[in-house]
Amino acid sequence: MDLSLLYHELIRIDGLDIWEGLSHVGGDRQVYAGALRLFCGEAAKKNAALAEALENDDWKAYAQAVHAVKGALAGVGAWELAQGAAEAEDACRRGDYQRCRDETGEIVGGINGFIAALKATVLFVRDEEPPREHANLVFLRKKLEDLKRACSTGSSGEADILGRELKTKTFDAATDALVEKICGYVENLDYDLALKAMEERAF
């Protein structure tokens, strides 16, 4: 991924403070890119939880869901959207449920628009795959151990790098198919499924 191009695109997204987002990951641009991808993968679930709580008038669940949304937005530097979620959370805690009803649609819509803006960047453009090089199982075992650790700790930037590296190698037909499946899970940020797939076969 061309990080220079990515940051040129990110800086144009309204309401995104990339410097604030970078401050949460020690200024590491690759890790921040991974955090944005992780946000996109999880935001739909958070939106669904928020909508379900509102539909059921479950205000305890609503407070938890909107708090999670606020934290996720603030964590990537989307301060304007995070502020809207913070105001809805405050309203919920005060018992002003009508305000929550009035504002939740705007919050969900704003998040969906933010996700769409992120998905229009090179962050979600697949790079053309390079020719694969033959590698041995010693190399594969080492990389899979590193990938297991990254997936277990939620280190999205490291997992993304390891997955891309593995996809440049070839082993044998059966191993290649399993590696492809593992890398697909990593790309989609499905780390639990990636870990499960890595346990399917001992290398």
Image (cartoon, rainbow, N blue to C red):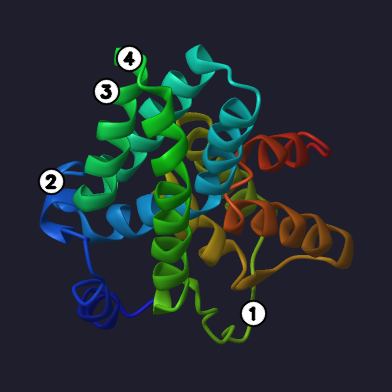
Q: Is residue 78 above or below residue 118?
A: above
Q: Residue at x 57, y 85 (%)?
A: 130
Mark 4 vs mark 1, CA separation in Å: 55 Å
Q: Residue at x 21, y 80 (%)?
A: 8
Q: Amino acid at mark 4?
A: Arg
Q: Closer to the N terminus: mark 4 or mark 1? A: 4
Mark 2 crowdedness (10 Å alpha carbons): few <14, some 14-19, many ≥20: some
Q: Closer to the N terminus: mark 2 or mark 4? A: 2
Q: Amino acid at mark 1?
A: Arg
What number is the disc on residue 171?
Answer: none
Mark 1 crowdedness (10 Å alpha carbons): few <14, some 14-19, many ≥20: few
Residue at disc 3, secondary structure:
helix
Residue 151: x %, y % from top left: 53, 38
- Name the residue at the front extreme: 98
Residue at disc 4, secondary structure:
helix
Q: Closer to the N terminus: mark 1 or mark 2? A: 2
What number is the disc on residue 90?
Answer: 3
Let me know if residue 203 appears in the view.
no
Disc 4: which residue: 93
Q: Amino acid at mark 3?
A: Asp
Disc 1: which residue: 132
Query: Does residue 28 appear to the left or right of 123 in the view shown?
Result: left
Q: Closer to the N terminus: mark 1 or mark 3? A: 3
